[in-house]
Amino acid sequence: MIGEGGPALAGTGAQPGAGALRRGIVIRLIQLLVEFALFGVVLFVAAGTIRWANGWAFLGVSLLIVLANAAYVLPRNPEIIAERGRRHRGTRSFDTIVMSVYTVFYLALFVVAGLDAGRLHWAPLDGGWAVLGALGMMVATVPVAGAMAVNRNLEQTVRIQSERGHDVVTTGPYRFVRHPMYLAMLVQLPATALLLGSAWAMIPAAGAAVALVVRTALEDRTLNRDLPGYQEYARHTRYRLVPGIW
């Protein structure tokens, strides 16, 4: 989905060719469509039916968010869309472990929501909570789009991108927190559970959130150690995730 983070960096490396850039963007869009299909399969198999309004609402809101992000980011920073669809060497080992844990909890969120709200009705939530969840997901896309628009090194994995040249991003949402995309993901996780109409889905959502918080701490440590200028940036932008609080 849209909520993957990467180093708060900007690069000065060479721009890819127009043809390669277009191919990269198309590949990334195909990847997102495949993800949507996977999420739909997990949701509706767990629910035991395709006649589950909350599941379709989640897929619809997610697609709307992707289209809105693309409309905003493509004119400003098309390269990052292509880069987020590519694999890169140099990913830190901790990131592979943490994101594997995150992925398990994230998929479990869909399984639990399908079982709860769609099939067994353990603790389903009424429509008002679903509306709140949809609003939360849409609000969270603001820092995501803002980060992607200004940060051409916002890849999906944590690594120092020495082959592309780096500098520290201090514009856009990076003026307020060092990891705005993670902030958005921490909002999206409980919002997803609400939109799917499942109170029990808050449990795997919380597990995924813990994995993200751990990732931000490890990523911050990596950037402080290995990225010139990041320590100074961290002194001025003191808050890692929540403006004015943390």
Image (cartoon, rainbow, N blue to C red):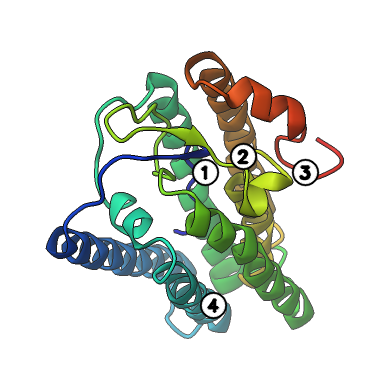
Circle 4: is it few (<14), some (14-19), or many (20+) Cα within 10 Å?
some
Q: Nearer the viewer, mark 4 or mark 2?
A: 4
Q: How many marks?
A: 4
Q: Check whether the beta carbons of the residues at disc 1 and disc 2 lie within 8 A of each other.
A: yes
Quadrant for residue 39, please give it. bottom left
Relative vertical location of residue 114 with respect to residue 243 in this rendering, above or below:
below
The three-letter code of the residue at mark 2 reads Gly
Q: Residue at x 28, y 61 (%)?
A: 28
Q: Check whether the beta carbons of the residues at disc 3 and disc 4 lie within 8 A of each other.
A: no
Q: Relative to residue 128, is residue 190 drawn left or right?
A: left
First-in-chain label (1 vs 2): 1
Residue with the mark numbered 1:
105
Q: Secondary structure at mark 1?
A: helix
| Residue 145 x, y percent position in the rendering | 54, 63
Relative vertical location of residue 143 with respect to residue 89 in this rendering, above or below:
below
Circle 1: is it few (<14), some (14-19), or many (20+) Cα within 10 Å?
many
The three-letter code of the residue at mark 1 reads Phe
Q: Relative to residue 181, is residue 72 drawn left or right?
A: left
Q: Nearer the viewer, residue 95 or 76?
A: 76
Residue with the mark numbered 3:
242
Residue with the mark numbered 2:
207
First-in-chain label (3 vs 4): 4
Q: Residue at x 69, y 27 (%)?
A: 234
| Residue 42 x, y percent position in the rendering | 40, 62
